[in-house]
Image (cartoon, rainbow, N blue to C red):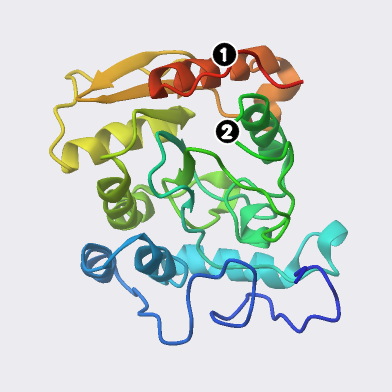
Amino acid sequence: MDPRDRAVPFDSPVPPGSGWPGDPADPSTQVARSADDVRRLAAGSGGLAELDARVSVCRACPRLVDWRETVAVTKRRSFGAEPYWGRPIPGWGDEDARVLVLGLAPAAHGGNRTGRIFTGDRSGDWLFAALHRAGLATQPTSTRADDGQRLIGTRMLATVRCAPPDNAPTPAERDTCSGWLDAELARVLPYARVLVALGGFAWQAAFTALARLGHPVPRPRPRFGHGVEVEVDELLLLGCFHPSQQNTFTGRLTESMLDAVFLRALDRAGMRPPTLRA
């Protein structure tokens, strides 16, 4: 079911359990309305499926709830005929992934519209093309939640799960959302061998989360940079410039630079293909 089909009666934002492709929640899913709720419901989730469902209905940050839902109602003109997800974005990909990709937050008219992280915006165009060239995604594009895209040995997640105004969550919003990040990392880290941090915000969030989970992070923390590598127990943290339009348009991040990061990730994960895909 294509959520862009005008005949499909999806509201914007999309209520849980209404049939949106990949919606992990239903009307009975427990809703977090405070930071304490986030920590309690995240820690009490039985597995990733339940955790994803609870993430996707979170209402703990009033400013983010208001923004994501306002965007879902007003929309961008080019997407005016489409329904908008308008809810938090859970992690996505393999539960036993060897490669983790951590970003900042969903885009207002990208993940906040499609319901899937990095899908439907220019950053996602660059990221999924690189993942496909490296053999970590089955398709070079990701446009909507039911487009058939599948990650291979990879899981994508965001530090903050709601689209923030100006792509800038507050420290309090970051800290509130950290309960979801910690719970997800605790479940996937036993399998992961490398975490690619897209941008400085994700880089710092990764170290902070690993420290909260009891891992020995270096002090002082290494500065973020493209291609910077840091070992934390069995995990390699790998820095990568964010594939934002500012970085890609100016040439600060090129396709070859992005390919090099994912080839290094594949090598560390023991998944390196003989050549990049055309």
Instruction: Please name the residue shown 57% across and 19% down the image.
Output: 273
Alpha-carbon neighbours of circle 2 within 10 Å: few (<14), some, or many (≥20)? many
Alpha-carbon neighbours of circle 1 within 10 Å: few (<14), some, or many (≥20)? some
Q: Could one spot residue 40 in this view of the protein?
A: yes
Which of the 4 quarters of the picture holds residue 195? top left
Residue in the foreground of this view, choosing between 174 and 231: 231
CA gap between label 1 and label 2 equals 14 Å
**Residue 136 marker:** 2
Q: Can you name the residue that lies furthest to the front here? A: 274
Residue in the foreground of this view, choosing between 170 and 122: 122
Q: What element carries label 1?
A: helix
Q: What element carries label 2?
A: loop
Question: Which amino acid, mark 1?
Answer: Ala
Instruction: Please name the residue shown 39% across and 18% down the image.
Output: 268
Q: Residue 192: horizontal and vertical position, in percent?
A: 34, 35
Which of the 4 quarters of the picture holds residue 190? top left
Asked whether the beta carbons under mark 1 and mark 2 sit within 8 Å of each other, the answer is no
Q: Residue 203: horizontal and vertical position, in percent?
A: 38, 29
Q: Residue 188: horizontal and vertical position, in percent?
A: 32, 45
| Residue named by callout 1 | 260
Question: Which amino acid, mark 2?
Answer: Leu
Above or below: residue 169 compared with residue 221: below
